[in-house]
Image (spheres, rainbow, N blue to C red):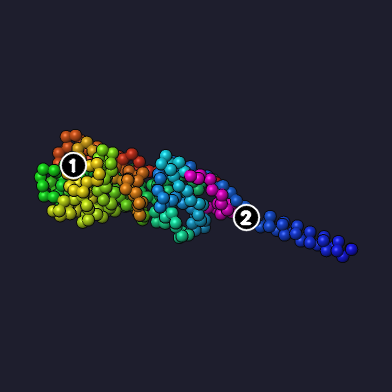
Amino acid sequence: MRKIFLGVLAVIALAFISCSDDDTTAPSKSVLNVNINGLENLGANFKYEGWIIVNGTPVTTGVFSVDDSGKLSKTSFVISSSQLAIATKFVLSIEPANDTDPKPSETKILAGDFTSNTASVSSTSMVGDFSNSSGKYILATPTDGMANNERSGVWFLDNSSGAATTGLTLPTLSSGWKYEGWVVINGTPLSTGTFTDPAKADDNATISIFKGSMGNGSAYPGEDYIQNAPTGLSFPTDLREKKIVISVEPDPDNSSNPFVLKPLAHDVPADAVDHNTYTMGAGPVSAITGTVTR
C-alpha cells in the first residue's frame, strides 16, 4: 500500500511540474490597435495586411477588409509581446486574398516608425508625396482625324508654348503603384489609361477600345472617346463641365473605379476651347493617415 501511495504522489508531482512548465514557457501576447481612416473596399480578391518590422524582418500582424463606408473589419490584433516590444515600424500592404507568400507584397500603402508605443502612419512615405504635384491638359481628339469632335478627348500635356510638353508634374511612385487618368461623365468614371511616366504615352495607348482608327494619339497620357461607349453613354461626347482626375492605383488592380488616392482634379470649364491648356487643382485625397498603438 505504501508503494502505491508513493507512486500516486509521484504522478501528481510530475503532472504539476509539467503544467508549471507549460505556464512559464507559453509566449505572452499583447494587443496592437489600428486606427486608420480613408481606406476603401478592395473587393473579394484583395485584403489589407499589417506588418511590424522586428530586427529588420517583417512579421505579420493579421489581415482585415474594409467595407463601403470605410469601416475596418478588425482593428485589434493579438501578437507576440516580445516581438511587439522591439518593433521599430508598422507597415500596411495590399495582398491577394489567397496569398501564400509569407512576405509583404510590393503594394505597400502606409508606414510609420514607432515612437514609444505609437506609430503615426501615412501613405506619403510608402506611395508618394503629392504636395508639389501639378497638372495641365488639353481637349483634343488626335486619333480620329476629325475636326468636329475635338472636345471628346483629353490629353495630359501643355501646349501653351506652341509645342507639346509634359503636362503632369508627379513624383515617381513606389513599386506596386501606377497613376491613372479619368474623366467622370454623368457619374460614370472612364479611364484614360494607366502610366508611371507622365512624359510618355500610357499603357493602353495602342490597344484602347475607345480611341479612333487614325493612330494612337499623343506621346503623353490621355484618351479619345470616339467609339465603344459603355452602356448609358454615347461617343463622341463633350467633356465640357465634366471632371478630370488623376488617381494613384494599386498594381495589380481589380477595380474599374478610381482608388481613394486622387492627388489632382479639375472641372472642365463650360466654355472650354479645344487645344487650349487648362490647369488642374489639388484632388480630394492626396494622403491617407492614421495611428497604430501597442
Magenta includes 273?
no
Mark positioned earlier in the residue sequence (2 or 1): 2
Magenta includes 76?
yes
Percent position of residue 225, x then y? 19, 46
Q: Amino acid at mark 2?
A: Pro
Q: Residue furthest right?
A: 1
Going 56% across and 54% down the picture, which residue do you hit?
A: 83
Q: Which residue is mark 2?
A: 27
Find residue 237 and name its label. 1
Going 40% across and 56% down the picture, which residue do you hit?
A: 106
In front here: 200 or 163? Answer: 200
Q: Amino acid at mark 1?
A: Thr
Percent position of residue 3, x then y? 87, 65
* Helix, strand or loop at mark 1: loop
Going 86% across and 63% down the picture, which residue do you hit?
A: 4
Going 51% across and 44% down the picture, which residue do you hit?
A: 75
Res 94 seen here: no
Q: CA distance from mark 2 to mark 1?
A: 64 Å
Q: Is residue 242 above or below residue 181?
A: above
**Residue 164 left/right relative to 77:** left
Q: Residues within 10 Å of mark 1 (few under 14, many from 20)?
A: some
**Residue 146 left/right relative to 225:** left
Q: Residue furthest top?
A: 270
**Residue 125 left/right relative to 281:** right
* Helix, strand or loop at mark 2: loop
Q: Is residue 202 above or below residue 236?
A: below
Percent position of residue 65, x then y? 45, 47
Q: Residues within 10 Å of mark 2 (few under 14, many from 20)?
A: few
Span of residues in magenta? 73-90
